[in-house]
Image (cartoon, rainbow, N blue to C red):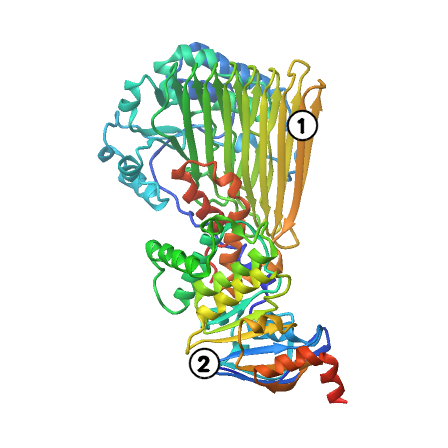
Amino acid sequence: MLVIKNLRVAINGKEILKGVNLEVKPGEVHAIMGPNGTGKSTLASVIAGRDVYDITEGEIYFMGKDLTELSVEERASEGIFLGFQYPVEIPGVSITNFMRTAVNEQRKYKGLDPMPAGEFLAKMEEKKKLLDIQAKLANRSVNEGFSGGEKKKNEIFQMAMLEPKLAILDETDSGLDIDALKIVANGVNMLRRPDNAFLVITHYQRLLDYIVPDIVHVLYDGMIVRTGGKELAIELEEKGYEWIKAGLV
Amino acid sequence: MEKDPKNIIDEVTQSEYKYGFFTDIEMDTAPKGLNEDIIRFISLKKNEPQWLLEFRLDAYRKWLGMTEPTWAHLHHPPINYQDIIYYAAPKRKKELSSLDEVDPELLDTFKKLGISLEEQKRLSGVAVDAVIDSVSVKTTFSDTLEKKGILFCSFSDAVQKYPDLVKQYMGSVVPSDDNYFAALNSAVFTDGSFCYIPKGVRCPVELSTYFRINAANTGQFERTLIIGDEGSYVSYMEGCTAPMRDENQLHAAIVEIIALKDAQVKYSTVQNWYPGNKKGEGGIYNFVTKRGICKGNNSKISWTQVETGSAITWKYPSVVLMGDNSVGEFYSVAVTNNYQQADTGSKMIHLGKNTKSTIISKGISAGYSNNSYRGLVKMTKRAENSRNFSQCDSLLLGDKCGAHTWPYIKTENKSSIVEHEATTSKISDDQLYYCNQRGISTENAIGLIVNGYAREVLKQLPMEFAVEAQKLLAVSLEGSVG
């Protein structure tokens, strides 16, 4: 599904990713862990297509397509979703209106007619119920005045509405109390299917108690330095990142 | 690769005006220029009583002694008032009682604009008084309104049919020498709309007028007079689009609203006249005087405007709060793009006790345009315990446009409260990226964000207008990107 080969990325001339290799297959949940400032969020942004980064070397393919040829919105319509670490506020735009616009633009990209209003609203209801989200949330402006937990829940809700093939969750657990964390994790677990995949980026092992990954990668200084099963996360939690550093010396 | 968002903003803010076409109808026109004979010609054409001719001539003489105001933040070449045709009317056949009698070409024009009279009539229950150039062509629903005693007709008809009401109220809110453009209008106005809601009557439909400038080189000088008698209610809408022109066209309208005791008048407008091309050539010069007076106690006047057109907009819909406990409101969205200039805002003059006013102004500037808010809130000595809340927000798209705010506040008593809030913001790259990541193109993201930004004002519009206005906002800023 997602194939990244020897990816090197720089911003303002400073190299952040120094040759990342990664392959994500349908049905898999990958976790990317690592200390702050090692390039985790950069990797997420580069896959999503943010243009502030320069890809100096390497390839990113998604479903056989060269992602570097596609704009951010085209990648989204191809099925890539990014759950933001810091979701932005869009005052005056209701979540309903925002989602309807997004759903219909993605449908247009695929050559489909806009979703009929009734069908769309029914889908909103279904996903709200699934994720245990209060009805009034949908009438509020996108992220405006939301608590940290509400913002993250809203990201998961949008993911549920857009039904991506690959969902990247960038530090979705940061700033969440344990209840909000459970709701977010629960949402992800309910949306897991054999034909979609998740890339969960996190600093702490805590989230992985609830979203159990198939594969764990440790990103350190712009490179994936270790890859293992879910037990790697636990080991990392016990020994700390110093252990990784020591192993590299 | 992905397009540079900056370029996309440039692209989408440089769309062509969608309503550029014009109708070829035989005109009955006055020669170019302005003098007392022209004014007599207009008055004669309209079969006016002597007092109205005197009113015009008096205004004209005052106008001759006045000078064009220069205080607004607007720049344009001098206007040659002798190079303008002051009267142009489609040739009148006879009284029209059904749409079949309307010039098919005219109907076609309306259809292109999406203002089909038939549709209006059938679907929305809106009484439409369609003004093409200067003469009112068609009034519908007047029978229904008549049963309630509501008078709704063209200004010219009102002069013939209800001369006493016209004489009593015309010029009572905007005196003929109020300002340069008001004086000009008072001298040469050709038509407009008239509306009177009798005591205790709640007007059952949204009253609506579509104005449209149609003849090359024809100045437009409309006059609207709305009178809400005691305890009445009316919601009045005005909307306009104009065909493409190379020459600048002058428009100087007057709207007067009178709200008597316990009356409520809600006035909404969507203005989408030709704004000129991308280089700033052509476009309408729009110098309008709109003012209402809350004459009686507990009366209310509310202005809502969505301004997207015209090369130059000079417009300050105001309320004089004379009656105790009266309420004045002003809700505005003004969009400027390319080389458009807007200097707009409101005046709230508090005279009565416990009077309340609200000003919500949202300016959106793109391209090389300039968008200014200019407002006055005045609390006179008698206006004890009065309140005003003003909020003026500016949104900038790109880095070559300007937003300016000139709020004037004068308070002559100690018990009144005046609040003013102002913000200036830009559409952030983060917002665009967030929308893009959900699959929304930058063009549509801008439309979405701008509509969200203006929502507080748009929600004040009657249903019939809200959808149109939303589209218009998006179209003004996006349109036909290749």
- Per the image, label 1 sits on a secondary structure element best described as strand
The residue singled out by tag 2 in the image is: A26
Q: Quadrant of residue B66?
A: top right
Residue depicted at x 56% and y 56%: A150
Q: Is residue B320 above or below residue A208?
A: above
- Per the image, label 2 sits on a secondary structure element best described as loop
Left or right: A10 as drawn, with respect to B207: right
Of circles 2 and 1, the one toward us is: 2
Foreground residue, B272 or A15? A15
Query: Percent x, y for residue B382?
Result: 65, 13
Separation (CA) of disc 2 from disc 1: 61 Å
Q: Is residue B304 above or below residue B481?
A: above
Q: Is residue B35 above or below residue B287?
A: above
Amino acid carrying mark 1 in the image: Val
Chain at tag 2: A
Amino acid carrying mark 2 in the image: Pro
Foreground residue, B5 or A217? A217
Q: Which mark is residue B175?
A: none
* Pointers 2 and 1 in contact (C-beta within 8 Å): no
Q: Is residue B80 visible?
A: yes
Badge 2 density bin: few <14, some 14–19, many ≥20, Cα 10 Å: some
Q: Is residue B277 visible?
A: no
Query: Percent x, y for residue B250?
Result: 52, 34
Q: Quadrant of residue B466?
A: top left
Q: Which mark is residue B418?
A: 1
Residue depicted at x 44% and y 21%: B226
